Amino acid sequence: MGCYGPWGRPDMAYFKFTKAILNGDTIDIYNHADMSLDFTYIDDLVTAIRLLIDQNPQKTDFLAQKLEAVDCKSPVAPFRIVNIGNS
């Protein structure tokens, strides 16, 4: 994930790509373009984190649930990883 905002470093991909495009320069491609990167604005990440703070895991009988009903927020884990910076 590429997080960008007003305090972003000028060497970050988002700014380098934008500058190159505006100047008509070529864009440096790394790793033979075998990668992907999402750009997420910092305010959006802060909002997502703030909304997740109030989402406490609920204890449920995990084995009684169908696997299709289980999302990335596992009801049996006291701490969970939630991807908030991906398309």
Image: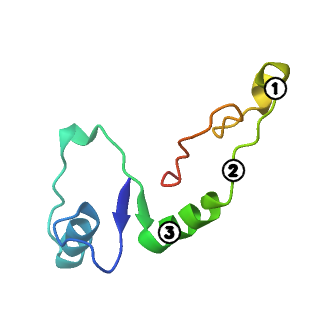
Q: Where is residue 26 drawn, in percent x and y?
A: 15, 62
Mark toward the viewer: 1 or 3: 1
Within-10-Å neighbours for mark 2: few <14, some 14–19, many 20+ = few
Residue at 48%, 55% in the rendered image = 85
Q: Give the camera-side residue of 19 and 57.
A: 57
User: Where, by quadrant of the figure, is residue 74 drawn?
Assistant: top right
Residue 43 point in image, percent of width and height: 48, 74
- The residue drawn where x is 67% and y is 60% is 54
Q: Secondary structure at mark 2?
A: loop
Q: Nearer the viewer, residue 80 or 1?
A: 80
| Amino acid on which the number 1 mark rests in the picture | Asp
**Along the polypeptide, which appears first: circle 1 or circle 3?**
3
Q: Amino acid at mark 2?
A: Asn
Q: Are marks 2 and 3 in contact (CB under 8 Å)?
A: no
- Dot 1 surroundings within 10 Å: few (below 14), some, or many (20 or more)? few
Q: Is 65 rendered above or below residue 31?
A: above
Tell me: 36 left or right of 70: left
Q: Which labelled disc corresponds to residue 38?
A: none
Q: How many marks?
A: 3
From the image, tell me which residue sits under label 3.
46
Looking at the rendered structure, the kind of residue marked 3 is: Val
Asked if marks 1 and 2 touch (Cβ < 8 Å), the reply is no
Name the colour scheme: rainbow
Q: Earlier in the sequence, mark 2 or mark 3?
A: 3
Q: Earlier in the sequence, mark 1 or mark 2?
A: 2
Q: Residue at x 20, y 38 (%)?
A: 32
* Separation (CA) of disc 1 from disc 2: 16 Å
Query: Furthest residue to the top?
Result: 63
Residue bearing the label numbered 2? 56
In this picture, residue 25 sits left or right of residue 57 = left
Q: Quadrant of residue 12?
A: bottom left
Q: Badge 1 is on which residue?
A: 61
